[in-house]
Amino acid sequence: MSTDYKRLTRDGLWDNNVVFAQGLALCPTLAVTSTATNGLGMGLATTAVLVVSNLLVSSVRHIVSPAVRIPVYIVLIATLVTLVDMALNAWVHELYKVLGLFIALIVVNCAILGRAESFASKNSPVPSMVDGLMMGLGFTLALVILGGVREVLGSGTLFASASLLLGKAFSFMELTIIPGYKGFLLMILPPGGFMALGLLLAGKRVWDGRKA
């Protein structure tokens, strides 16, 4: 049972980052990161599901037969995603209209099922929750960075419509980075997502290589 919380934090945020190191959950990563705000919304929703699903899987690990563990995990995750989907629809409807389809796809997010199988099913609830939180925050960080790069290059703004997600008090986050910039349309289209992600993956590899 792992209780090295410093290690769990470093793994989730950087060393074993869901996107930059494991290469998982690339469908939502590329689909919703046309803006940093969309990435933040998807990342926070996924983090909530990761934390609670890890807690539930860890809590039932001794009473679920290994033969049916995967279907049980999927049912638990699907229930949590449904609750998150309904909450977004009720309280953040404008953002829900942008992310609605992809929120439902969290059920089959391989990062969530992967952490349930590889960590939560083998560890106690508290370390499992920390692992879920850090993996979720690392995923959120990756989506915000990728979304930020695409948004700045694609439209010259950063955190556009952040007030829809966080409330009017956070409208100060809505920045115009390049005034008068008409934007590079390719960066907010799917090909731009692949290009930006490739550059970020290369940058992480160079950074890690220099540190090593």
Image: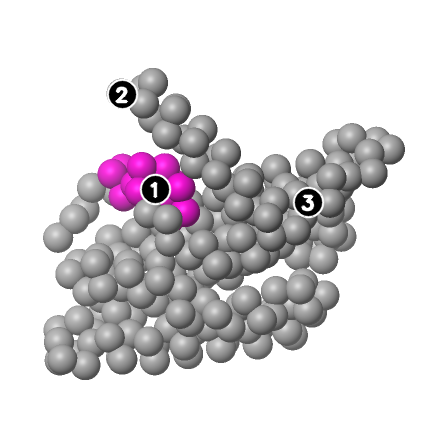
* Secondary structure mainly formed by the magenta segment: helix
Q: Is residue 8 left or right of residue 175?
A: left
In terms of secondary structure, where does tag 1 sit? Answer: loop
Does 212 appear above or below 124? Answer: above
Q: Earlier in the sequence, mark 1 or mark 2?
A: 1
Quarter of the image for residue 175 reads: top right
Q: What label does residue 212 carry, if any? A: 2
Circle 1 sits on which residue? 21
Q: Earlier in the sequence, mark 2 or mark 3?
A: 3
In this picture, which residue range is highlighted in magenta? 6-21
Decide whether residue 39 is among the magenta residues: no
Q: Amino acid at mark 1?
A: Ala
Quote the CA–CA distance across marks 2 and 3: 35 Å
Pair 1/3: label in front? 3
Q: What label does residue 186 carry, if any? A: 3
Would you call the spot at circle 3 few (<14 residues within 10 Å), some (14-19), or many (20 or more)? some
In terms of secondary structure, where does tag 3 sit? Answer: helix
